[in-house]
Amino acid sequence: CLKLQEQEVSQRVATVAAMDAWHTCKPFVTGSMAGCMAATVIQPIDMVKVRIQVGAADGGSTSPVHIAKTMLRDEGPRAFWRGMSAGYLRQVLYTGSRLSLYDSFTAAASSPGQPLPFWKSGLCALTAGGIAAVVGNPADLSLIRMQSDSLLPVAERRGYKNVFHALSVIVKTEGALGLFKGAAATSTRAMALNFGLLTFNAQAKQQLGAMGCTPGGKVQVFGAAAVGGFFGAVLSLPFDFVKTQIQKMRPDANGNFQYKGPLDCARQIVAAGGPLRLWTGFPVYFMRSAPLSTITLIAQDYIKKMWGQVGL
């Protein structure tokens, strides 16, 4: 009898420990799953977006229709999903981190029964975005390299097989710190995106709830996600444009890079084409960013409900 009781106690302790570990990991798992679901749908648009930004900096075409037709003709349909392995890894590291950190930060900053003030929500979003961007930078860098590799002269192409091959090539040729190339630009872009996306999403939910929309209902979830997606796209595109230029650049024959850093990159771009050059490809970026953000937020809400339905 004593042995049975000891076994039952041990099982209960193990179950409690497992549930505690799950509750700690659940926000990260939820964010990662939501991000991967959205990335699968949006990847072709993201591919065209990167080609537009590369073309704008190099003097090439910035027409989404022309770029899509050229890709389809020269590289085939699979080209639109090139870098998908890096895209999934990026969603796990970056989206999983930023959404889980934002939930944790807002939970810590909230007062029971009181809506979170806009400035607190914004600060939580900025902090979560900056930290998550550094965590996800290696995967983000690999994604940009894989998406733009076919645009290089044949002799300079790396022929990346998957994200892990891309990571190994970067480490071999540029060192371990090369994985964090453009981290400053990536973090700034992520902070702007997170601020627009999560802060305005939270505020829109509050406003829609005050207008009588059912909490957690389709109107509130879809409407708030759309508002967050729009502001996230508008605020983050200039930083995303600079990030792409920094991450795709390679040293010349003398070992020098075209840009000294994000600020120098932005300065040269503005000097060459004016401030609006930083918003090059906004329609495509919005078509990619807003749905990605909207699908991510909707999927996150759905997955959270699913955990509750299955008792997790």
Image (spheres, helix red, strand yellow):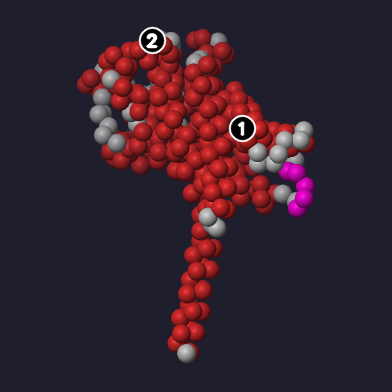
Residue 307 in picture, x, y percent from top left? 54, 52
Residues drawn in magenta: 112-116
Q: Secondary structure at mark 2?
A: helix
Residue 138 place in picture, x, y as percent? 40, 38
Return the mark for residue 222.
Answer: 1
Question: How far from the left and from the top, in percent, is residue 131?
Answer: 54, 43
What is the C-alpha distance between the residues marked 2 and 1? 32 Å
> Do callouts 2 and 1 mark residues in contact (Cβ within 8 Å)?
no
Magenta segment main secondary structure: loop
The residue under label 2 is: 66
Relative depth, front residue between 110 and 181:
110
Q: Earlier in the sequence, mark 2 or mark 1?
A: 2
Circle 2: residue type: His
Which residue is rendered at x = 47% and y = 43% of the image?
33
Identity of the residue drawn at 57% across and 37% down: 297
Please report the residue visible at 41 percent of the width from the left and 11 percent of the height from the top.
Answer: 65
Identify residue type, mark 1. Answer: Phe
